[in-house]
Image (tube, rainbow, N blue to C red):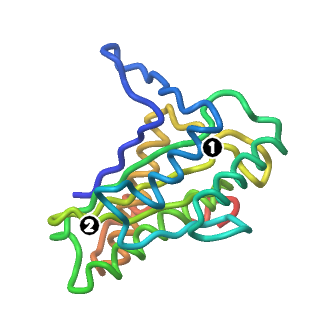
Amino acid sequence: MATIESFSTQKNENDKPVAYRLRNEEDVRSITHYALNGNTEKRPVFSSSRGFTSSTKDADMISEEILMVQDLHRKKTGIRIRAETVRIGKEELGNDKLCEVKEIADGLGGYYLGLGHQVAYGIYDHGCLYEIRYAINPVSFADGSKYRYNKHSVHDQEEMCLATIIADTTGRNIPDEKRFDFEKLENY
């Protein structure tokens, strides 16, 4: 089963979200590099981005564009970058696993872009599963609104979106009531 894990927030013992720091320009740069380039031990098998005018894979240029959007909308306080990881077991995919995980990664990137948020991502092969690392600009390039992700309903919507993308990519059927309606995304 595929899962989405957000690293921008964590829960404490009272089940209330607690924000990680991720509040300065260096955090934007390091999370973007982490998603697109990995580290010395693990490199992505594929990386891309959605919603950027500069480059699709250059982490420095993407970071600068994220910071420019935040500066343009005067949103330089609070969380400056959102970090998410999606893990998908290879047993969930068909014969052309890498092609399918690329389509899934781009589809979820399209979800964030449809909400008006720039997103960069890298796909990592961990043997029995793929890990997709996302760096998401929490400030909308369209209207400057912040991505509100501390609510369970938003996480449930992301999970429903991911399940729909996986089903469509792998050719599985899911009931209509469990399908995400992409038509309701403003910029889709």
Q: Nearer the viewer, mark 2 or mark 1?
A: 2
Q: Dot 1 surroundings within 10 Å: few (below 14), some, or many (20 or more)? A: many
- For the residue pair 51 and 165, the one nearer the viewer reads as 51
Sequence-wise, the earlier of marks 2 and 1 is: 2
Residue 42 in percent (x, y) is at 30, 59
> Label 1 near label 2: C-beta < 8 Å?
no
Q: Residue at x 32, y 66 (%)?
A: 175
Q: Dot 2 surroundings within 10 Å: few (below 14), some, or many (20 or more)? A: some
Residue 104, numbered circle: none
Q: Is residue 43 left or right of residue 58?
A: left
Helix, strand or loop at disc 2? strand
Q: Residue at x 71, y 52 (%)?
A: 64
Residue 88 in percent (x, y) is at 26, 62
Q: Is residue 183 above or below residue 157?
A: below
What residue is pinned by disc 1? 138
Distance from the alpha carbon under mark 2 to that under mark 1: 27 Å
User: Looking at numbered disc 2 in the image, what kind of residue is underneath it?
Assistant: Asp
Residue 125, numbered circle: 2
Residue 67 in percent (x, y) is at 72, 46
